[in-house]
């Protein structure tokens, strides 16, 4: 589609335990609100942010850098919500 936009950002995992079950569930819940595609990747592999099992496989430990891509009409809003989760350490600290 001509009106689709892609946004890409890199985030550092700041929370102490990284992307474990609870942060993964928060990401899936946030991603599920949006129509756009949302991908999170590390070291060349990428998974859908709408898949909790996928998110648990990306080795998002504290200090690691993850690439996030949002593709679609509500990509900006989706990226803002995902960014807030990373910046607020998934509300764990």
Image (tube, grey):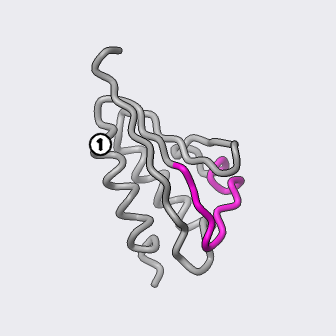
- The percent position of residue 21, horizontal first and vertical second, equals 61, 65
Which span of residues is magenta-colored? 53-67
Which of 81/28 is in front?
A: 81
Is residue 77 magenta-colored?
no
Mark 1 lies on a secondary structure that is helix
Q: Is residue 71 above or below residue 55?
A: above
**Residue depicted at 42% across the width and 76% down the height:** 91
Position in image of residue 79 (x %, y %): 36, 48
Q: Quadrant of the C terminus?
A: bottom left
Q: Quadrant of residue 81?
A: bottom left
Please tell me whether residue 74 is drawn above or below residue 23 in the rendered image.
above
Q: Is residue 56 left or right of residue 70?
A: right
Magenta stretch, overall SS: loop
Residue identified by numbered label 1: 76
Q: Residue at x 47, y 79 (%)?
A: 92
Residue, x 44% and y 65% (percent of image)? 86
């Amino acid at each position: 589609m001509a009106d689709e936009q892609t946004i890409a950002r890199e985030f550092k995992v700041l929370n102490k335990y990284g992307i474990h079950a609870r942060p993964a569930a928060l990401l899936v819940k946030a991603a599920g609100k949006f129509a756009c595609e949302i991908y999170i990747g590390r070291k060349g592999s990428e998974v859908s942010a709408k898949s909790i099992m996928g998110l648990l496989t990306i080795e998002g430990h504290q200090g690691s850098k993850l690439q996030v891509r949002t593709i679609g009409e509500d990509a900006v809003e989706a990226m803002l919500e995902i960014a807030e989760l990373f910046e607020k350490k998934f509300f764990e600290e």
